Amino acid sequence: MSQVEYVGMNTINHLRGILKKIGARNLLLVTERKVFELCGAKEALESVLEPYNTREFTGISEPPDYASLMDGIEVFREFRPDVVIAVGGGSVIDTAKLVNYFSVQEHPPIDYIMENRMIVPGSTPLIAIPTTSGTGSESTRFAVLYIEGKKYSIDDQSILPKFCIVDPSFSFSMPKRVAASSGMDALCQAIESYWSVNSSEESKSYARDALTLAVKNIECAVNSKERSSVEAMSLAAHLAGKAINISRTTAPHALSYAMTSLFGVPHGEAVSLTIGEVLVANSLVGDYDVSDPRGPVYVRETILEIVKFLGCSSPEQARQKIRDISVALGLRTRLSQCGITRQDIDILSNSVNLQRLGNNPRKLDKGFIEGILRNVL
């Protein structure tokens, strides 16, 4: 399924035309009420939504969990919308994607997640309107769901929103810590996408542009909310989402999920804790541990390209550059700062998401992962 996208200031003005084109009548609005009001979306959408029969679902968990999904499905099936509109950050958009996806299935979602049952593609259009600059969820065909603390990534082409409206005006109200974490998520997604074993020329183009924009603008966007930088980070996040939609994420994301679910570390911050170490590790790939079919020379050259995009001359310098950006944003750079101890390293290394780890261009075994975690303790 292809996506129609509108990116830039005031692109929210396209929503009225989209709804008219669809022939909408009953709208399910998925959002987090406080964010919906504070970011300006409520005011911007009020007159647009007024003619329609609109039902809100605001029971969003952070991160998305199974109970919230089931609540959303109940609302969807009772209301029977012909359009779903998601307005919010990654958790809101992921929840809307999953509710829209699973509501038309015959069996409970858990059966499809655990037993790989055949999915019936839904036909209800989803319009995604992000209010943060980071996850890129509006442009991906997958969504994150946590079940009993374990992260699952639901991946299907029909999950991709039919429309997305990326209007930077809604991201100015992000609290600094949210902006910092989500911005680092976009930066890390771009890096990981570029070196992923699944990368293509198209995904690398998106990732390169996203990384270049993020490195140049992230500090001003977060710390001083300069208009041009906020707009640039909004585009960077969207491009990073388009990149990982093709390539998927890799080791730093694989290591991050347990930090979030078990220790409460915000997602983007969790990813940023290890990405510098993984970058250096990937730069040392050899014939014996390469997992990218294009070979170790290709991988090493790819890492050096990333180093250059970061404005650095070596992987070690790039690692420090990422660390410096995190510090400038007020993010933590050590596991110990997050309440994670040496004893917890075994828990984290045993909780790695193997699906994401398999996308890394260098094979990383448990011992290597523990070494990476000790290095950032």
Image (cartoon, rainbow, N blue to C red):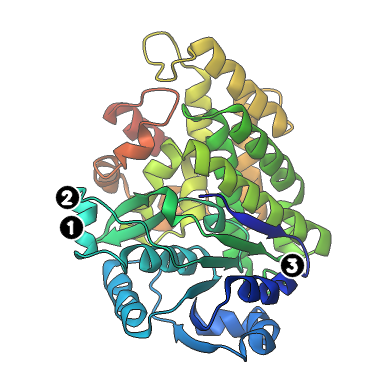
Residue closer to the observer: 237 or 226: 237
- Amino acid type assigned to the residue bearing label 1 in the image: Asp
Q: Residue at x 30, y 78 (%)?
A: 71
Can the viewer see residue 331 in this picture?
Answer: no
- Estimate the x, y position of residue 122 in percent, counting from the top left: 38, 61
Q: Residues within 10 Å of mark 1 (few under 14, many from 20)?
A: few
**Is 150 above or below relative to 88?**
above
Give me the disc on residue 11: 3
Between 20 and 160, the one nearer to me in the picture: 20
Is the residue under label 1 in contact with that under label 2 (CB below 8 Å)? Answer: yes
* Residue 288 placement: quadrant: top left
Q: Earlier in the sequence, mark 2 or mark 3?
A: 3
The residue nearer to you, when weighing 224 against 99, is 99
For disc 1, the marked residue is 111
Residues at marks 2 and 3, CA–CA distance in whole angstroms: 41 Å
Q: Is residue 63 left or right of residue 40?
A: left
* Identity, as a three-letter code, of the amino acid under mark 2: Glu
Residue 319: image x %, image y %?
A: 59, 34
Look at label 3 and name its amino acid: Thr
The circle drawn on residue 40 is none
Farthest residue to the top: give it: 287
